[in-house]
Amino acid sequence: MVKNIAVIRGDGIGPEIVNEALKVLDRVAELYGHTFRYTDVDMGGCAIDKYGDPLPESELKKCVESDSVLLGAVGGSKWNDLPGSMRPEKGLLRLRAGMGVYSNNRPAKIWPQLSDASPLKKSIVEQGIDFIIVRELIGGIYFGEHKTEGDTAIDVLKYNENEIERIGRIGFETAQKRNKRLCSVEKSNVLDSSRLWKKVMHRLAGEYPDVELSDMLVDNCAMQIVKNPAQFDVIVTENMFGDILSDEASMITGSIGMIPSSSLGASSCGLYEPIHGSAPDIAGQDKANPIGTILSAAMMLRFSFDMRAEADAVENAVSAYLDAGWRTADIMSEGGKLVGCRRCGELIIENIKRGRE
């Protein structure tokens, strides 16, 4: 099978972690008889330096015409003083909108080998952490009107029923494939947009009688994620709430460097990226953890290319790597064996090979 993948290496540690993920994909292609063709795309700070634009139309076109997109990370202090419309992150928002990927899915799953790395009490971790946050990605306050008038700044939070319904369906369908429990998170005691969100979710619930729907206010959800994460199966929420909650959820699993994500819309062409930032303080030092990016590539294999066995092989290789005690600095613990970014990728590749022998 031939697949065309747009590759956004980005800024900071982005090029390093993407390189390791591409090596993993090359190994999968070799062992399973596929061909992955890569097209480099400039986005973020590197695109600003090169084109004066965080995502030129010509670069966006490469992504839209691909079978899927693999992204490292964008941004850094070098571009912090630019106006909002020129910041590297603006390229990411434009990419999501241009690709029409309205559903961002972030798993929060603790690897047994890293249970000691969780900041939560052992008694909480032992109950299990394994849920998914389904975040609406191209609406809400991030995509509303933004303006400053004198000493007053205005950011508009707006949703319509169609935007809520399509992400709601993703939430219900994701829950159907898991443990059939969906928690809808909003702030309906204060916000009109959240009251509409709750209304639409309850209307949809009638179409998914096999899924148990519950409601939770966002502030309570933030507390419950650290108090009793085992209660959650799938969480569905709007853009800003999802952004905050998914970062919180990632940290209770032990390391933000381990968490992949997928962003999908109406087609199988998705955007896959680790949830961490560009970490410019360690860029070029071979210290970064590439596992979040490698697992994002595995999600691409599973959800965009329907290569389930290949995705399993990558995930099993990561598990075997952790079983052997190998650790990058961000997840290093007593008794672990410290490795850098490149060696981490090499060890995972070796495990994929062994899994096919």
Image (cartoon, rainbow, N blue to C red):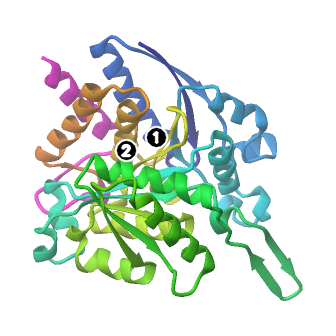
Q: Give the amino acid at mark 1.
A: Glu
Residue 232 in the image: x percent, y percent? 27, 66
Residue 356 in the image: x percent, y percent? 16, 19
Q: Give the amino acid at mark 2.
A: Pro
Is the stretch drawn in magenta largely helix, strand or loop?
helix
One can see residue 17 in this view: yes
Q: Nearer the viewer, mark 2 or mark 1?
A: 2
Q: Indicate yes or no whether the magenta region holds residue 235.
A: no
Q: Residue at x 66, y 64 (%)?
A: 142
Q: Residue at x 59, y 81 (%)?
A: 191
Closest to the observer, 20 or 213: 213
Q: Residue at x 78, y 68 (%)?
A: 145
**Which residue lies most toward the front here?**
206
**Left or right of residue 57, residue 326 in this image:** left
Q: CA distance from mark 2 to mark 1?
A: 8 Å
Q: Judging from the image, what secondary structure is the residue with disc 2 in?
A: loop
Query: What residue is disc 2 on?
Result: 290
Assess disc 1: are there few (<14), some (14-19) or many (≥20) residues with their C-alpha within 10 Å of its C-alpha: many
Query: What residue is disc 1 on?
Result: 16
Which circle's residue, 2 or 1, is located before the other in the chain? 1
Residue 342 in the image: x percent, y percent? 35, 37
Q: Is residue 150 above or below residue 240?
A: below
- Name which quarter of the figure residue 305 lies in: top left
Q: Are marks 2 and 1 in contact (CB under 8 Å)?
A: yes
Q: Judging from the image, what secondary structure is the residue with disc 1 in?
A: helix
**Magenta region: which residues?**
329-357
